[in-house]
Amino acid sequence: MSGPSRELPRWVDLGLIPLINLIAAFLVTSLVFLAIGESPLESVGIMLNGAFGYGSGLGYTLFYTTNFIFTGLAFAVAFHAGLFNIGAEGQAYLGGLGVALVCLPLGALPMVIIIPLAIIGSALFGAAWAFIPAYLQAKRGSHVVITTIMFNFIASALMIYLLVNVMSPIGSMNPETRPFDPNAHLPLMHDVFAGLGIEIARTPLNLSFVWALICAVVVWLMLWHTTLGYQLRVLGANPSAATYAGMKPQRLIIIAMLISGALSGFLALNEIMGAQNRLLLEFTAGYGFVGIAVALMGRSHPFGIVLAAILFGALYQGGADLSFDKPTVTRDMIVVIQGLVILFAGALEHMFRPRIAHFFTKPLKAKEAKA
Amino acid sequence: MTANKAMAAHPAIALAHIDKRFGPVHANKDISLVVEKGTIHGIVGENGAGKSTLMSILFGFYQADSGEISVNGAATRIASPTDAIKAGIGMVHQHFMLVGNFSVLENVVLGAEGGFVLNQGLGKARRELERLERDYGLQVSPDAIIDDLPVGLQQRVEILKALYRGAEVLILDEPTGVLTPSEADHLFRILRQLKAQGKTIVLITHKLKEIMAVTDRVSVMRRGEMVATVETAKTSPEHLAELMVGRRVLLRVVKAEREPGRTVLEVKNLVVKDQAGTPKVNGISFVVRAGEIVGIAGVAGNGQSELLEAITGIRQPFSGEVRLNGKHLPSDAAEARVQKLAHVPEDRHRLGIVTSFDACENVILGYHGDEIYQNGIFQDRRAIMADTEKKMQDFDVRPQDPHLRLGLFSGGNQQKIVLAREIERDPDLLIVGQPTRGVDIGAIEFIHKRLIAMRDSGKAVLLVSVELDEIRGLADRVLVMCGGDITGECAPETPEKQIGLMMAGAAA
């Protein structure tokens, strides 16, 4: 017996359900605000204004968005192949090492050479860090969830060692490298627009935002319009069918993880080469983990991921503004809001689904009758 | 006494106006059914006709949206299997619900242990079990471990379990699917004996021969509706099939004599082991020639699956060789396709399709690397679409929508898509496992015709099926497998009883 079929219109699946989940998250958030005696409406107003209302607010929102697009895409690619890569944090960390190894020694080269080299460096190191768990999963069956999270810790320890003992300049007390040469800075959007004669606010928002959007399009093309993407999706949807179809699951697992690791590594382009201009500790700041929520909320589709990334970018930036404006709203409160959004959009994603599905199955039945 | 008489007048089970929906699927439409006491009542219907849903409602797995259930004339609310058991209804599932490493006795008392100290209950249970075995001729040693018992005996334990719980009405769901013909005969003897003792039996099956052999009355379901209830003696398999499908169907396969040609597939001393290293195929050899269908008969789980998987490159054989068209065939699913071997896997959902993908994405599965589907570095969506539309048309797949998710097609249409994908490649060898499992009668006819057409065009076909009738109808030559060995080879006209003996491992 085939179970009840629940084919929802795409706009419901990708638009309405995430929206309802989001509203639920904000309703619960309102209760928290009421409990501490703040007006929820006013707070939402401040957050929205902080995220989108003025130039530099929007700039910061899109700067954070860039990080989330990279880590969201990274998670989604592996997820489509049936792999739960929760190691974006560590892979991005190592990506930073790749960027630094290009930008520190080659800082005198022209920008047009450094940028592609840095992209390759971040991808290579991110992918390399994903390779070991991938290999262990493919050949030995060690679960990537376990190995990737362990590799996050190893990455953290390794970077501390490198930054404290190897890469920090002699005489410096800070666990960080020397600043990159100006040629090794990714151009800020402020400067790019200034070159076009348009004045925008000066924020860390840099060219890697454009690169993130390009990656989203490339990932979409790869997953749905190439044979490789097709194979990855078959592997994720039905591994036995992949074997039946003559695909090589072990190789596909490794390829998916390499792509995922490379995308994670790109986070360093934004943070290290775009904003900090030096390699430092803990620059990944949890973006890798939030990327999981971004991917789940975006239903692992690049377009949805970009939208979810904007939402989380806005939460980061708007939340920062809110805690600045309202002394009663601490940074922790902002974390609570983010947590609630992740809870409703990620973990409780299916809470409202059956009811909504029930509501939308009626028009479907009419369509079936016609067929 | 008077109470007894009054009860006898009531039917054992009466369902009135049962209605059940699952989302958009209307599984049971206003169904009424009366099962008389002390009879064997068959329920037939195609897959998805609603038989299992109806029985699940009767046994309390699902609740009907509306309608009423009466047991012995009294309206009864059955909200859970516990209620059903209390009302004297027992069910023997298609897949047994037994604990493999427990003894027969322990399984029988499972869930009805009676008392805090197990031993006390066990002693009582043993006496009761012995009485039941005596009364109904269901001999099983109470201390045997379930895993050591053959399937036929395991089924007996299931029946004993139901009787132990005081079942007056026994529902059997596809009970012969896993049995050899002689085991099935034995089961029917038991059912008749139970009937003679006054028990009522509801038998769900899709095998019309069994219905004719054992039932008193039979109800036919079609697309969620009860279309007819007839006396078995006054009907025929052809008539039942027509009721099930809603049109006349050909139950016999028509095929012309044909002389087989050159050897296409040659299997030599093939040994296949499972992950644990247990041999599943013990060094078997056979050939399949062009223009013949070789059928492998056997009870499920006797090495057929492993054999197919080893030949088609899904599973690495332990030793032995497979040759195709005289050339060594490595155990590699991709290479096998290049060498013109097509494979319709027996477990469609596990291997053959991706239910969450569109039909068009399933049509390229296994052939996704083909030149015709490529356009530079991208897949050629237009070519894939055109190809899917053509295949859907050729194989009469309904609905003809390349963008519909495969999970939303019926089993028969899913199978047609798999067949279209594999047959249209013009392979030299077609390997087919359970071609009609979960497929409705109308589509079975179509699929059988296609397989015969393959053979008539000079292709080699290796067919594995647990449906002996299907093997006998289609194959030119029958190999029988039991316990990983080929226990016999015979002509398809060989009496069923003789093939059945080979299926049970006796030498021909």
Image: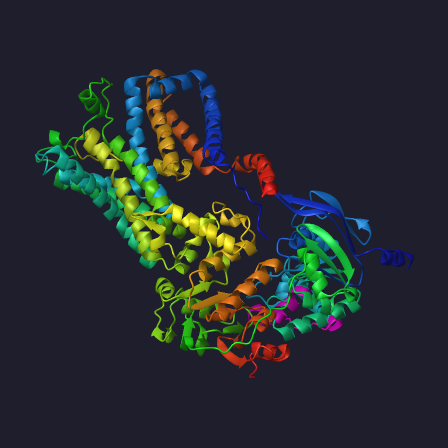
User: In the image, residue B352 lies at what x, y percent?
Assistant: 46, 58
What is the number of callouts on the image? 0
Q: Which residue is at the front of the view, A7 or B78?
A: A7
Q: Give the vertical position of B203 relative to A191 (above or below).
A: below
Q: Quadrant of residue B500?
A: bottom right
**Residue B32 visible in the displayed image:** yes
Question: What x and y, as percent, mark residue B383?
Answer: 39, 49
Question: Depth check: A248 or B252 in front?
Answer: B252
Q: Is residue B148 magenta?
A: yes
Look at the picture and state if B139 lies above or below B200: below
Could one spot residue B361 in this view of the protein? no
Q: Identify the residue at horizontal 63%, vertical 68% (top origin).
A: B252
Whether residue B453 sits left or right of residue A203 in the image: it is: right
Q: Give x and y (percent) for residue A328.
A: 38, 18
Q: Please, is residue B19 above or below residue B7 in the view?
A: above
Q: What predominant SS class does the magenta segment belong to? A: helix
Farthest-out residue, bottom: B508
Q: The C terminus of chain A lies in which quarter of the figure?
A: top right
Q: In which quarter of the view is residue B128 placed?
A: bottom right
Q: Which residues are magenta?
A: B133-160
| Rendered residue at 21%/45% (across/down) | A124
**Residue, x 36% and y 53% (percent of image)?**
B372
Magenta region includes residue B466: no
In-front residue for pair B11/A238: A238
Q: Is residue B212 left or right of residue A321?
A: right
Q: Quadrant of residue B234?
A: bottom right
Task: Residue B229 in the image: state x and y as whole percent.
Answer: 76, 57
